[in-house]
């Protein structure tokens, strides 16, 4: 059932297209050293042209060994089947961080956040941890932006600039200003 659930999600990802926000973020690479830290498990940032993407919660178009999480494989097509095995002979599973599992890329995400000159948060309530804690690692003098239609001021971050729009509108607007 789990494999079939992810096979259906993988089919949806393959059919999906990058939106204006993905494309705007990729455009920033012309002027800035852009690192994308995403909680999304799709590859839409890469397909839009972003070069440096860190996937906190894994990648749906990849599988990994159920015995050794460092053995990661691309999934050809949209189906991972029971009986698909790694070189060690163990069943392959979706390369996704499941609830209760450690987020293995969190330390790398923190290191990136600590070096940011501009820190842009897009489409999140800042309620899901540990990813929501990344803003706390941004340098004190970094420009902070939050793009979300339901965003509200955060008292511990008075310099946070709120853009109360959906990503497809707010990100291109912000990127246009940053490119000037």
Image: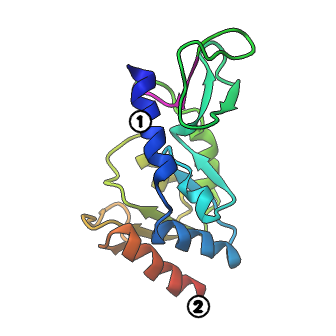
**Which of the labelled discs sits on residue 63, or is there none?**
none
As drawn, is 158 to the left or to the right of 68? left
Task: Give the percent coordinates (x, y) of residue 114.
Answer: 61, 55
18 falls in the magenta region? no
**Which of the labelled discs sits on residue 8, or is there none?**
1
- State the separation of the CA atoms marked 2 and 1: 41 Å
Label 1, residues with CA under 10 Å away: few <14, some 14-19, many ≥20: few
Q: Which residue is mark 2?
A: 180
Q: Secondary structure at mark 1?
A: helix
Residue 48, image quadrant? bottom right
As drawn, is 109 to the left or to the right of 145? right
Q: Earlier in the sequence, mark 2 or mark 1?
A: 1
* Residue plotted at (44% across, 27% down): 98
Task: Give the percent coordinates (x, y) of residue 151.
Answer: 28, 65
- Vertical position of residue 18 compared to residue 61: above or below: below
- Residue lying farthest to the right in this orientation: 87
* Residue plotted at (44% across, 62% down): 121
Q: Is residue 34 visible?
A: yes
| Quadrant showing the N terminus | top left
As drawn, is 91 to the left or to the right of 174? right
- Vertical position of residue 63 compared to residue 134: above or below: above
Magenta residues, start to end:
92-99
- Residue lying farthest to the top in this orientation: 89
| Quadrant showing the C terminus | bottom right
């Amino acid at each position: 059932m789990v494999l079939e659930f992810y096979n259906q999600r993988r089919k949806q990802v393959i059919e999906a297209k990058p939106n204006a926000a993905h494309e705007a973020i990729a455009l920033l690479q012309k002027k800035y050293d852009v690192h994308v830290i995403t909680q999304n498990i799709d590859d839409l940032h890469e397909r839009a042209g972003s070069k440096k993407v860190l996937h906190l919660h894994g990648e749906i178009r990849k599988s990994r060994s159920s015995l050794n999480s460092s053995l990661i494989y691309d999934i050809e097509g949209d189906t991972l089947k029971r009986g698909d095995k790694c070189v060690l002979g163990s069943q392959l599973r979706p390369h996704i961080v499941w609830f209760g599992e450690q987020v293995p890329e969190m330390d790398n995400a923190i290191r990136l956040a600590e070096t940011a000159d501009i820190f842009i948060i897009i489409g999140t309530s800042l309620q899901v941890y540990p990813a929501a804690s990344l803003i706390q690692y941004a340098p004190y003098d970094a420009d902070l932006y939050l793009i979300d239609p339901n965003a509200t001021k955060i008292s511990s971050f008075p310099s946070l600039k709120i853009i109360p729009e959906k990503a497809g509108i707010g990100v291109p607007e912000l990127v246009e200003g940053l490119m000037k």
